[in-house]
Image (cartoon, rainbow, N blue to C red):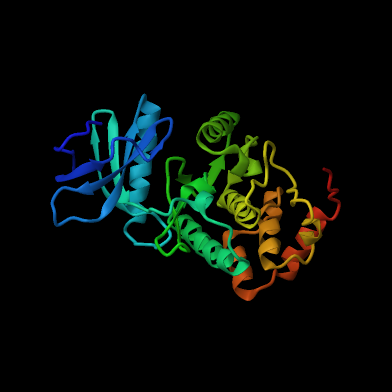
Amino acid sequence: MVFSNKGVSIEGETYLIKGKKPIAEGATATIYKCKRKGKQHKELYALKKLVAGDLEQQNKIKEEVKTLITLGIVNHPNIIQLVAHETVDNSTFLVYHLYSNGTLENLAEAADTLIMKTFTMLLSGILFLHQSGFRHNDVKPMNVLISDDKITPVITDFGSVSAERIEVTSRKEALTLIDFHARNTTATYRAPELWDIPSECTLTSLADAFSAGAVLFFMLFRKQAFEYNVGKVLLPPGEEGKYEGGGILIDVMLSLLIVDVENRMSVVEALEALNSGSLSEKQRALNLKFYKAKKIKR
């Protein structure tokens, strides 16, 4: 990346870098603040530079761009929109609108009513992603931007995306997927079924549902649900009584964080529960069964 008055040319438009330092950096990606060249252009953008060190990374970046283009056909308010993109040698440049309020990680503590609105919209974005045939695999507060209204969440960073449903038919496939998730997703938000994948199984969108539950935990308590190992969630001291009858947000959170994938609440069911204000009798029974034997240890 060269900082100069000439800027960076992407799809025939010149983008000028604002400031000499990036606004975010990762292992393979760097994000800069920029604007289109010309006095008539006032809007600020985020310019994401991805560098591919090998063929695997090149394919991963191509998949991310392909996903963003496909999702961009419908301008969903809770999914980041790709403004422009271009690949030069081993570098790919992605341009997005800039969200100056940061991510869910930066969001100040909020009342349950505000959390309800934001989380419901987040689930809507995740559901749209699944209905489009994709699974995000790395839903976490850092990957959810906050719009200018300080309420609307916008899902970003599709570098770990996969097909919504994957049929695993061999040990080799399982090991490949275990390695992929270990290297490309965040452990404290990763669904339990992605840690030790059986040789024959089906991975589904319920993995994102678990991650969404962990995000809701963060929104409610401003801390991670799991520090090291994923398991039965521990509520913060003084909140243990909420395992039963702690309100619809707690009920939905616990339903999404059930380790057993066959008993876990789906994104669709979570939206239905939030809209109706209560769990189904079936889900309430599943929650009681899963959390009943839980012993709180400090």
**Residue under the point 75% across and 48% down:** 234
Q: Quadrant of the C terminus?
A: top right
Q: x and y percent of residue 117 in the render?
A: 54, 67
The answer to whether residue 11 shows anywhere in this view is no
| Front in this rendered view, residue 223 or 67 | 223
Compared across the picture, whether 35 is left or right of 50 comes to left
**Quadrant of the snapshot with the N terminus:** top left
Q: Residue furthest top?
A: 54
Task: Tell me: 60 left or right of 288.
Answer: left
Left or right: where 175 falls relative to 221: left
Which residue occupies the foreground of this view, 31 or 50?
A: 31
Q: Which residue, as the protein is rendered here, is positioned at the far bottom?
A: 276
Q: Residue furthest front?
A: 19
Number of numbered discs on residues: 0
218, above or below 170, in the image: below
**What residue appears at the point 56 percent right and 32 percent down from the top-left corner?**
182
| Residue 43 appears in the rendering | yes
Where does residue 231 sit, x and y in percent of width and height? 73, 43
**Where is residue 288 drawn, in percent x and y?**
81, 60
Residue at the (38%, 53%) spot, across then down: 100
Q: Pick whichever, 154 or 18, lies toward us.
A: 18
Residue 130, image x and y in percent? 48, 55
Residue 36 placement, left or right of 224: left
Which quadrant of the structure image shows residue 115? Answer: bottom right
Task: Answer with the quarter of the image where residue 167 lies.
Answer: top right
In depth, the one of 255 and 66 nearer the eye is: 255
